[in-house]
Amino acid sequence: MAIAAVIVIVFMGSLPGRIAIARKHPDAEAVKIMGWTGLFFAVPWIQAFGWAFKPTNVIDVRYFPKQEQENIAEETEILLGKASSTLQPTRAGDLPAPHFKRAS
């Protein structure tokens, strides 16, 4: 019974994150974290489950739509652990700094 309970808890905790990753949600990592923390309180888990199904039409003025889709695909590969070692940061300090252009 204890093993079955652990399996159910793991399944329920990972469900919103797995749905968001499968739907290529741009905020899949946040949905995944909210799903796991929501196991202790019901309301965050319900919100994460709903958020996983939210339409994912992303419009970002910094990128062309094709570029944004490539970025989402890259983030999804990192979350699934399928990305090459060059894409996966080992520490938070290894993340590249954002580049901003100033209007003159």
Image (cartoon, rainbow, N blue to C red):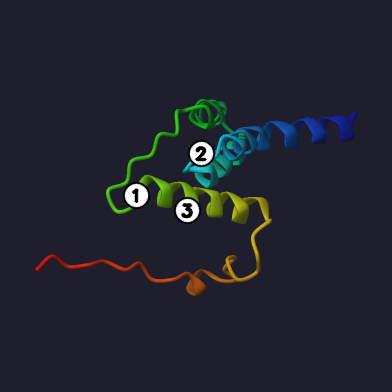
Helix, strand, or loop for circle 2? loop
Q: Is residue 87 above or below residue 9?
A: below
Percent of width and height locating residue 94? 51, 74
Residue 74, quarter of the rendered image? bottom right
- Separation of residues labelled 2 and 3 (CA atoms): 11 Å
Q: Position of residue 47 (x, y in %)?
A: 49, 28
Query: Element type at marker 3?
Result: helix
Disc 1 crowd rating (10 Å Cα; few below 14, some 14-19, many 20+) is few
Cα distance in 3D space between marks 2 and 1 = 17 Å
Which numbered disc covers residue 25?
A: 2
Q: Identify the residue at image location x=88%, y=33%.
A: 2
**SS at mark 1 in the image:** loop
* Disc 2 crowd, CA 10 A, few/some/many (<14, 14-19, 20+): many
Nearer-N-terminus badge (2/1): 2
Please give the residue where the numbered disc 1 appears in the rendered image: 64
Q: What residue would you read off at disc 3?
A: 71
Are the residues flagged by discs 2 and 3 in contact, CB closer than 8 Å? no
Separation of residues labelled 3 and 1 (CA atoms): 11 Å
Report x, y in % for residue 45.
Answer: 56, 30
In the image: residue 82, left or right of residue 37: right
Which residue is depicted at the point 68% across and 56% down?
A: 82
Residue at position x 57%, y 36% in the image = 20
User: Residue visible at 38% across and 71% down?
Assistant: 97
The N terminus lies in quadrant:
top right
Q: Amino acid at mark 2?
A: His
In the image, residue 100 sits, relative to residue 78, either above or below, namely below
In this image, 69 relative to 18: left or right?
left
Q: Nearer the viewer, residue 84 or 79?
A: 84
